[in-house]
Image (cartoon, rainbow, N blue to C red):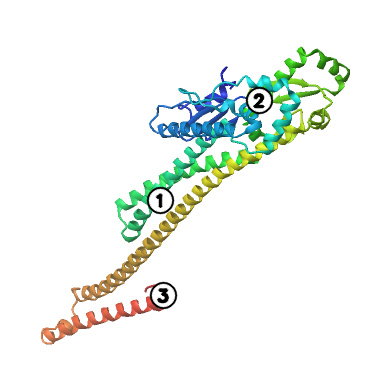
Amino acid sequence: MRRTGLPARDLRILDPLLSYPSTVLGRERAIVINLEHIKAIITAQEVLLLNARDPSVAPFVEELQRRILRHHQATKSQEAGGGGNKADWTNLYDLEEPQSDVVSPPNFSPSFRAKDENKADGKQQAGENRDGPKLLPFEFVALEACLEAACSCLDNEARTLEQEAHPALDKLTSKISTLNLERVRQIKSRLVAITGRVQKVRDELEHLLDDDEDMAEMYLTDKLMEQLENSSVSSISGQDGIDEEVIQPNMDDRVPVEISMDENAGSTSYDAEIPHIDNHEERLYGGPNALSRGSRGTHTSTTRSAISKHLDVEELEMLLEAYFVQVDGTLNKLSTLREYVDDTEDYINIMLDDKQNHLLQMGVMLTTATLVVSAFVVVAGIFGMNIEIELFDENKAGMPEFLWTIGGGAAGSLFLYVIAIAWGKHKQLLE
């Protein structure tokens, strides 16, 4: 907690024993990431992984190390080709150099103090650097690696599920069996689970993109550099007697610098003051032109800081939008698969309803035949009654009369059955 400045409630998000949704939190000195199997804390100087020895996280650790190494090499190349601005590039990216044993850059270079001793020249050079090419800060390199690992994991699971789902659904449509139904049930359960996970990641990225304040919280390198610069300016102004004599009459022009973060996150604030200096560049970025960034909840002392923050937010927004589009594509793919499963279920229900209708028709036909046979049995029962009639006269009764009776009863029953079936088809009760 002292190392990252995070409160206990933020650290509980990374507890594997607790169930927390996908989360990306920006704090004053760290970024807390809980995305799928990636549980990390990113600072301006290092990346702390909770489950670095997990086999599923090992590829991510290797990729993160490669990214930091490439970033370090790109920074060195930029420094080598920077010419007169080499010192500024060093000051800007010294905190991003990786260490040998830890996924982190080294401490700040002492050249920061040398820059602060020449404030006007340093600020002018910093403005030139802002117009030139700029590499991603260390925290964004690590954040991009985490987002790519989480999005790739979800996309691979979605692709694997899609490859397994289509053959199983096709088999179920061709043959409805208990085995095929069980396979489709398992696939549908996995589909619901993966869709929920992808939806949580998408919602978190969408929340970050909609809130500029949360994105501004993630600029750890810029905030740390501003704090060091302001502290160096304060120390130099206290030691420089000439500057103090110039500053004393102009106390009203001093502008407070406040780097404050989300109070609910348990973060702290840093306050300093910058004197008004009669220099064109200093007046351009001085107190009279200070901007209040109320929409992002972060107040800076200079227009330069406000413009830099705005550009940096756009830079982070572009980074997040790229992975938001990827996650949204994965969600659309899962939605398409869900629609295919629903269509298959509807088709199977139609097939089952059709079979049920055929069974009902067969039941109607059998019931009609039973009714007709019952009528014939009634006729036979009538003749079986022990009542004396002329038909039972031995002189008149014989084989011809018996055959005529049986044949007439059977023919009448068959005629009644045909009439009943024809009436059912006429009324469209039977096909």
Whether 132 is drawn above or below 381: the answer is above
- What residue is shown with label 3? 428
Q: Residue at x 54, y 22 (%)?
A: 106
Question: Nearer the observer, disc 2 or disc 3?
Answer: 2
In depth, the one of 83 and 182 nearer the eye is: 83
Image location of residue 26, percent across then percent down: 61, 30
Amino acid type, callout 2: Met
Q: Residue at x 40, y 29 (%)?
A: 54
User: Is residue 214 in sight in this rendering?
Assistant: yes
- What residue is shown with label 2? 225
In depth, the one of 266 and 309 nearer the eye is: 309
Circles 1 and 2 in contact, beta carbons < 8 Å: no
Whether 111 is drawn above or below 401: the answer is above
In depth, the one of 67 and 116 nearer the eye is: 116
Amino acid type, callout 1: Glu
Q: From the viewer's perspective, tell me whether residue 117 is left or right of residue 199.
A: right
Q: Residue at x 57, y 17 (%)?
A: 2
Whether 325 is drawn above or below 61: the answer is below
Q: From the viewer's perspective, tell me whether residue 198 is left or right of residue 218.
A: left
- What residue is shown with label 1? 162
- Which class describes the residues within 10 Å of circle 2: few (<14), some (14-19), or many (20+)? some
User: Is residue 299 in sight in this rendering?
Assistant: no
